[in-house]
Amino acid sequence: MRNLLDVDDLAKYLKLQKQTIYNWLNQRKISGMKIGGVWRFDKNEIDRWLKSQARKAKQ
């Protein structure tokens, strides 16, 4: 079973404002899926994205 986060959960997990999450979705920095009109994010995909961002920062 996938570990899905909603916008509130993701904002808390990343210690960001919810508006930042919506901005990143709009800018296609992160991907999510809408289920029943609510954005959901796969925690494993978010973790992979974070690792890729960390690698880019080191270069």
Image (tube, rainbow, N blue to C red):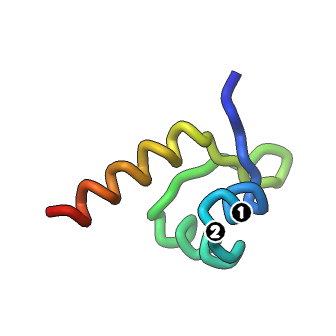
Q: Residues within 10 Å of mark 1 (few under 14, many from 20)?
A: few
What residue is shown at x 82% (from left), y 53% (from top)?
37
Asked whether disc 2 touches disc 1, contact meaning CB atoms under 8 Å apart, the reply is: yes
Q: Give x and y (percent) for residue 29.
A: 45, 63
The count of marks equals: 2
Is label 2 in a helix, a strand or a loop? loop
Tag 2 residue: 15
* Label 2 to label 1: alpha-carbon separation: 5 Å
Q: Give x and y (percent) for residue 25.
A: 57, 65
Q: Give x and y (percent) for residue 11.
A: 68, 65
Location of the C terminus (image quadrant): bottom left
**On the image, which quarter does residue 57 sit in?**
bottom left
* Residue extending furthest toward the right: 36
Q: Amino acid at mark 2?
A: Lys
Location of the N terminus (image quadrant): top right
Looking at the image, is 52 positioned above or below residue 8? above
Q: Amino acid at mark 1?
A: Lys
What residue is shown at x 51% (from left), y 41% (from top)?
45
Tag 1 residue: 12
Looking at the image, is 48 positioned above or below residue 11? above
